[in-house]
C-alpha cells in the first residue's frame, strides 16, 4: 500500500508490491468517471454503472452529490473537493489514495467485481487532472478505465441557449483554463501545483477568434478580458458568463468582452462559472430553452416518503424547478411477516384485493415473490385508489380493474359497492363479498369501515410500516431557513403531521410564511389543523394534479 505523500509537490511514493500487482488487460480496479457539469441526468450510462458497483467513491467538489444515489448502500464515500484556497486533499494525496484504495480492494476477495470510482466534475481529461491520476495508476500497475463525461464548456453554453459552434458564425471553439499565475511568490508556488500547464497565448486566441470558452476564470476575468483586448480582440465581441451551469440555479449574464468583467462584478457572480466569448452568444434569445421553462427559478421543498419522492421531483425538475427533498415518511417492513404471508397465500379466495398506495403494491409484490408466488396468485379483480397506484400495479404486470374518479377511500368504497353490489346500496349490498386490503399500518380506517357497513368481509393487512425520520436532511434545513424557498408540497396527511413533529417552533413558523400545496382535501384538513392551511389544493388528487395546480399558479 502506498503512503500519502506530503504537500511539497513531490512524486508520490509507490511501494513495489503495489506496482507489481495487476496488468493493464485485467478487469479495471479504478474508474475515472466524468460526472458531467452538474445536472445529474447528464452522467453516462457507463458512469452510472460504475457507481453502482463502487466499493469506494472519491468525489470532487463539482460532482453533483445526487449521483451518489447510484452507489450501493455499503459504498465508502470520500470527499476530495478542491476549490480556491480550500483543498480537502492535495492532488498528491488524491493520487496516493486511489492507489491505496485499489490495492486494498484487490486484496479483498469478498468484494470481487467491485471497483474504486474517482468521480470528477465534467470530463476527467478536460481541466480535471484525470490524466495525471491515470498516469499514477498506470505506473502503479493498477488497471483503470476512463469513462468520459460531458464537459461544462459544451453543456453549460447549451443549457444557456448558446451553441459553441454555428455555421453562420464560427467553425472553431477553443477551451481555455481561466487560472492565471499571480506575480507573488506564494501565489506562484500554489499555482505551479494547481494550474493546468503552460501559460495562455492570448495573441493566438485573439487571432483565431471563433468561440472562446474559459473555465474557472471568475476571479481572473478582468485580467483575461484585458489581455484579449490588448491582443486585438474587439471589445464589442459578445460575451456571456454562466453561473452553476446546468443546475436549476443556473444564471446567465450577457454582455460584451469589454464590459463582462464589470457586469459580473456588479452582479456578484461567483464560481463555478463558464465564460463564453464569440458571436454565437447572439443566438441565446432564440435558443434559451433551459431558463425559459415554466418553473425555472422556483425552489420547491417536497415532503414525501423517501421511496415515492422521485416521480414528483423528476416532473418538477423537468419543468425547471429546483427541488429539495425532505423525507418525512420512511417505509419499513413489518416486524413479523407471518400474518401477511397467511393472507397472501389465500389471495384467490377474495372477491378483490385492494391497494391504496404504490408502496403497498411494491411491498406486497416483494413478499409474494419471496414466497415463490407470482402474478397468477392475484384474484380476478384488483382495485387501486388512483392512477399512481394503478401504475405501480402495471409495473408488475397487473391491470387495475377498479379505480374511483376521486382518489380517496370513500370514493373507492363506493366504487367497490357499485361493482360488487350489483347496483344495490345499503347495509347488505356487499353481503358475501370478501376484500383484502394490503396497505400501510397507519392507513385511514374509512375504507374498511364503509365496506363493513355494506356487509362485506374485510381483512385489512399492513404489508409495510411507516416511521418518522429522526431529522430533516441538511439540504432541507438550509432551504427552509432561506429566503429562496417558494413552495412546500404535501402529498398526504402524514407528511404534514410528520413534518410538524420533526420541526422546531421556529421552523414551523417558517413553514407558515411559505406557500403550501396540498394533494387533496384530507391532506388539506390535516394541514389546517396544524396551522398550515394550504395556499393551493390540487383539483385532481394525485401527483399530476399537483403539478398542474403549480403550473397554473405560477403561470
Image (spheres, grey):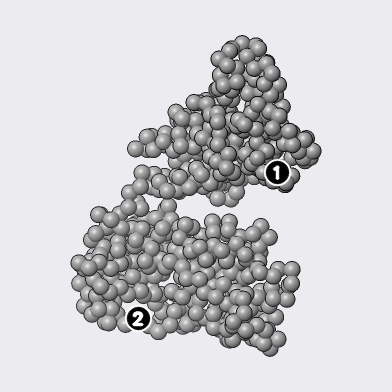
Residue 96 drawn above or below residue 446: below
Image quadrant assignment for residue 76: bottom right
Left or right, 480 with reference to 203: right
Residue neighbourhood size for the residue with mark 2, other residues' Cα within 10 Å, grouped as few (<14), some (14–19), many (≥20): some
Left or right, 159 with reference to 345: left
The answer to whether residue 451 is visible is: yes
The answer to whether residue 410 is visible is: no
Marks 1 and 2, how far apart at CA = 67 Å
Q: x%, y% of residue 401?
A: 55, 31
Q: Secondary structure at mark 1?
A: loop
Q: Nearer the viewer, residue 346 or 184?
A: 346
Left or right, 88 with reference to 234: right
| Callout count | 2
Q: Earlier in the sequence, mark 1 or mark 2?
A: 2
To which residue does mark 2 refer? 200
Q: Residue at x 53, y 46 (%)?
A: 310
Q: Secondary structure at mark 2?
A: loop
To which residue does mark 1 refer? 373
Q: x%, y% of residue 360?
A: 64, 37
Q: Residue at x 71, y 32 (%)?
A: 461
Name the quadrant of the C terminus: top left
Residue 447 drawn above or below residue 169: above
Residue neighbourhood size for the residue with mark 1, other residues' Cα within 10 Å, grouped as few (<14), some (14–19), many (≥20): some
Q: Residue at x 52, y 66 (%)?
A: 46
Residue 5 drawn above or below residue 339: below
Name the quadrant of the N terminus: bottom right
Image quadrant assignment for residue 144: bottom right
Image quadrant assignment for residue 328: top right
Q: Residue at x 65, y 20 (%)?
A: 451
Left or right, 494 with reference to 524: right
Amino acid at each position: 500500500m502506498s503512503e500519502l505523500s506530503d504537500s511539497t509537490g513531490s512524486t508520490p511514493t509507490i511501494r513495489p508490491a503495489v506496482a507489481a500487482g495487476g496488468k493493464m488487460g485485467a478487469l479495471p480496479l479504478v474508474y475515472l468517471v466524468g460526472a458531467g457539469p452538474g445536472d445529474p441526468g447528464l452522467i453516462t450510462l457507463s458512469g452510472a454503472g460504475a457507481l453502482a458497483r463502487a466499493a469506494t467513491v472519491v468525489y470532487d467538489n463539482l460532482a453533483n452529490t445526487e449521483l451518489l444515489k447510484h452507489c450501493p448502500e455499503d459504498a465508502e464515500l470520500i470527499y476530495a473537493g478542491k476549490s480556491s484556497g480550500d483543498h480537502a486533499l492535495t492532488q498528491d494525496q488524491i493520487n496516493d489514495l486511489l492507489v491505496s484504495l485499489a490495492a486494498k480492494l484487490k486484496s479483498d476477495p469478498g468484494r470481487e467485481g467491485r471497483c474504486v470510482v474517482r468521480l470528477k466534475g465534467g470530463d476527467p481529461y478536460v481541466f480535471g487532472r484525470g490524466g495525471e491520476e491515470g498516469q499514477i495508476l498506470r505506473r502503479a500497475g493498477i488497471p483503470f478505465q476512463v469513462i468520459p463525461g460531458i464537459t461544462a464548456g459544451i453543456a453549460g453554453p447549451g443549457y444557456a441557449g448558446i451553441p459553441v459552434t454555428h455555421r453562420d458564425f464560427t467553425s472553431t471553439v477553443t477551451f481555455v483554463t481561466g487560472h492565471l499565475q499571480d506575480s507573488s511568490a506564494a501565489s506562484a508556488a500554489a499555482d505551479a501545483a494547481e494550474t493546468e500547464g503552460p501559460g495562455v497565448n492570448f495573441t493566438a486566441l485573439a487571432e483565431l477568434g471563433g468561440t472562446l470558452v474559459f473555465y474557472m476564470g471568475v476571479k481572473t476575468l478582468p485580467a483575461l478580458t484585458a489581455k484579449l483586448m490588448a491582443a486585438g480582440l474587439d471589445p464589442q465581441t459578445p460575451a456571456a458568463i454562466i453561473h452553476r451551469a446546468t443546475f436549476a440555479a443556473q444564471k446567465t449574464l450577457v454582455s460584451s468582452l469589454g464590459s463582462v468583467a464589470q457586469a459580473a462584478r456588479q452582479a456578484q457572480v461567483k464560481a463555478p462559472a463558464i465564460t463564453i466569448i464569440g458571436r454565437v452568444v447572439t443566438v441565446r434569445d432564440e435558443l434559451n430553452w433551459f431558463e425559459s421553462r415554466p418553473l425555472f427559478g422556483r425552489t420547491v421543498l417536497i415532503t414525501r416518503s423517501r421511496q415515492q419522492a422521485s416521480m414528483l421531483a423528476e416532473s418538477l425538475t423537468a419543468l425547471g424547478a429546483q427541488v429539495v427533498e425532505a423525507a418525512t415518511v420512511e417505509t419499513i417492513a413489518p416486524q413479523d411477516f407471518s400474518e401477511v404471508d397467511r393472507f397472501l397465500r389465500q389471495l384467490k379466495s377474495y372477491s378483490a384485493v385492494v391497494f391504496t398506495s404504490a408502496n403497498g403494491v411494491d411491498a406486497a409484490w416483494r413478499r409474494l415473490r419471496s414466497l415463490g408466488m407470482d402474478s397468477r396468485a392475484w384474484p380476478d379483480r384488483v382495485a387501486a385508489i388512483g392512477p399512481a397506484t394503478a401504475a405501480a400495479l402495471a409495473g408488475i404486470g397487473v391491470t387495475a380493474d377498479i379505480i374511483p374518479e376521486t382518489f380517496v377511500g370513500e370514493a373507492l368504497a363506493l366504487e367497490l359497492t357499485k361493482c360488487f353490489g350489483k347496483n344495490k346500496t345499503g347495509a347488505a349490498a356487499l353481503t358475501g363479498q370478501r376484500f383484502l386490503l394490503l396497505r400501510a399500518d397507519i392507513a385511514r380506517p374509512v375504507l374498511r369501515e364503509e365496506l363493513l357497513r355494506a356487509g362485506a368481509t374485510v381483512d385489512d393487512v399492513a404489508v409495510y410500516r411507516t416511521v418518522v425520520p429522526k431529522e430533516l436532511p441538511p439540504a432541507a434545513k438550509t432551504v427552509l431557513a432561506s429566503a429562496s424557498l417558494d413552495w412546500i408540497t404535501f402529498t398526504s396527511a402524514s407528511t404534514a403531521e410528520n413534518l410538524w413533529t420533526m420541526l422546531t417552533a421556529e421552523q414551523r413558523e417558517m413553514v407558515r410564511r411559505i406557500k403550501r400545496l396540498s394533494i387533496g382535501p384530507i391532506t388539506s384538513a390535516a394541514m389546517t389543523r396544524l396551522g398550515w392551511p394550504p395556499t393551493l389544493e390540487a383539483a385532481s388528487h394525485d401527483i399530476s394534479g399537483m403539478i398542474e395546480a403549480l403550473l397554473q399558479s405560477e403561470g
